[in-house]
């Protein structure tokens, strides 16, 4: 019997689209929320979004956006799973540390990962990745 997904993990790409006012991304998130789907983000995605801000005004806007979602902190189990993914896929597929941590978060928390960069994750077994829009 497979793992039952308990919600969705929004990848950094979705957060970037939301921060840029992408209406398709906003509609997607709104529809998922109305359907009662729990939406979460990895602390890694939160950090990536803020790190990409150009000034304090953008940081304030990013923090307001991030406050809407449950943030999943890095745990020892997530860190170990990410390490295992790096060992398995960094050389063969170019898996980077942030993506390994985000994927590990989805795996450990049994969440469907929503990303338009599914090519970064498709080699990871048991990870459910969907393009949100």
Image: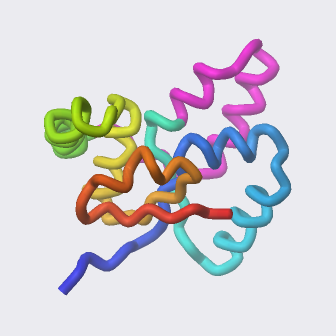
Q: Residue 53: horizontal and vertical position, in percent?
A: 69, 20
Q: Residue 26: horizontal and vertical position, in percent?
A: 78, 57
Q: Residue 94: horizontal and vertical position, in percent?
A: 33, 32
Q: From the viewer's perspective, is 34 left or right of 90?
A: right
Q: Is residue 71 above or below residue 90?
A: below
What is the magenta range?
Answer: 46-74
- State the colouring used for the structure image: rainbow
Q: Is residue 129 above or below residue 47?
A: below
Q: Is residue 47 magenta?
A: yes
Between 53 and 128, the one nearer to me in the picture: 128
Between 78 and 117, the one nearer to me in the picture: 117
Q: Is residue 132 magenta?
A: no
Image quarter hosting the N terminus: bottom left
Q: Is residue 66 above or below residue 129?
A: above
Tag count in the figure? Answer: 0
State the residue at coordinates (60%, 77%).
Answer: 36
Snapshot quadrant of residue 27: bottom right
State the residue at coordinates (75%, 39%).
Answer: 19
Image quarter hosting the C terminus: bottom right
């Amino acid at each position: 019997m497979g793992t039952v997904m308990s919600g969705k993990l929004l990848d950094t790409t979705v957060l970037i689209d939301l921060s840029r006012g992408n209406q398709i991304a906003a509609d997607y998130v709104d529809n998922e929320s109305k359907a009662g789907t729990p939406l979460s983000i990895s602390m890694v995605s939160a950090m990536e979004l803020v790190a990409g801000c150009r000034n304090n005004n953008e940081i304030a806007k990013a923090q307001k956006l991030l406050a809407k979602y449950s943030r999943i902190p890095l745990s020892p189990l997530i860190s170990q799973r990410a390490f295992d993914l790096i060992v398995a896929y960094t050389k063969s597929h170019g898996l980077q540390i942030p993506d390994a941590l985000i994927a590990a978060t989805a795996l450990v928390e049994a969440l469907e990962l929503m990303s338009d960069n599914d090519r970064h994750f498709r080699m990871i077994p048991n990870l459910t990745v969907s393009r949100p829009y």
